[in-house]
Image (tube, coloured by chain):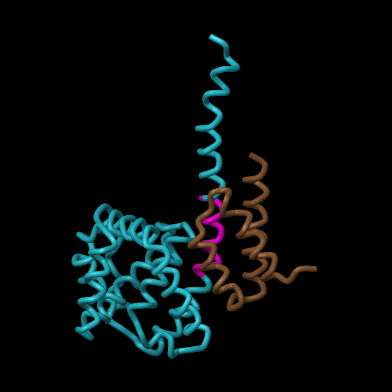
Chain colours: A cyan, B brown
Amino acid sequence: MNPEAITAEQTPESGLEARREIIERAREERAEVADSYVSGIFRNLKETYPYKIERAAEFVRTLAPVSDVEALNGIAEESQGLKKMRYKTAAVISALYWQFAAQGKIGAGTSLMTTGALAALRIPELAETSPKAARFVEAASRFLADGKEYLAETTKALVHFTEHNPDELAFDEAESS
Amino acid sequence: MPTRKEELRDLVAKLIPLGEDAHELKFWEEIFEDLSEEDQIKVLENLRTELKSLEGL
């Protein structure tokens, strides 16, 4: 067998793998900027509209079975009519965002942005906290409308994490009081 | 000399055909002007490096 022929056959696959690695590494690096940007916006919100973290922890159990974007949208739509539920939805997604960002469990810039954008849209008051936040909410809205597949993938990642790392979702009691 | 935003648009246009996600990069374009100068530079460096690596494959 000609060794060169083997190399030629393997090249497309190894090329794809190399491409995936480069893209993923670049996204991981962009995640640092995304973290700083989205955190800044949510820090404002946390000061303006404080919420109880234990409610978020409780709601993780409701979120965990969600396995596709339609189901998540269903929860979001349902929560719009119930102020408390709406805040719980927003709180848990924000809390997950903070946890994942702090622990590096979701490193890709896409995941951070998606999670931040999703949280933003669940809190209508966010847009009122600053012009920058308002622009973020507007961009997040377009991003989520255009990026359904990414949202679905990110949701799956969140669900996978909540199912496989329940202990790491234990929220700091001091923070929840 | 292109502005940072123009350079970003150029990088995005080149990265998408190489496999990057259009939705994510479009989002970066939308929020780019709200990023600090330091973060804008970081994003541009990141995309330049990514483009160079992908083009070198």
Residue range highlighted in magenta:
A24-35
In percent of width and height, residue A82 lies at 20, 84
Residue at image position (64%, 65%) is: B9
A49 is within the stretch colored magenta: no
Nearest the camera: A105 or A112?
A112
Q: Is B53 placed left or right of A100 in the picture?
A: right
A28 is within the stretch colored magenta: yes
Q: Is residue A103 above or below residue A125?
A: above
Residue at image position (42%, 61%) is: A111
Please name the predominant secondary structure of the magenta segment in the image. Answer: helix
Q: Is B4 placed left or right of A109 in the picture?
A: right
Residue at image position (66%, 53%) is: B49
Residue at image position (31%, 76%) is: A90
The quarter of the image holding the N terminus of chain B is: bottom right
Q: Is A101 placed left or right of A29 in the picture?
A: left
The quarter of the image holding the C terminus of chain B is: top right
Quadrant in the rendering for residue A98: bottom left
Nearest the camera: A25 or A4?
A4
In percent of width and height, residue A58 lies at 20, 71
In percent of width and height, residue A167 lies at 26, 58
Given the current orientation, which residue lies at the most extreme top position?
A1
Given the current orientation, which residue lies at the most extreme right position?
B1
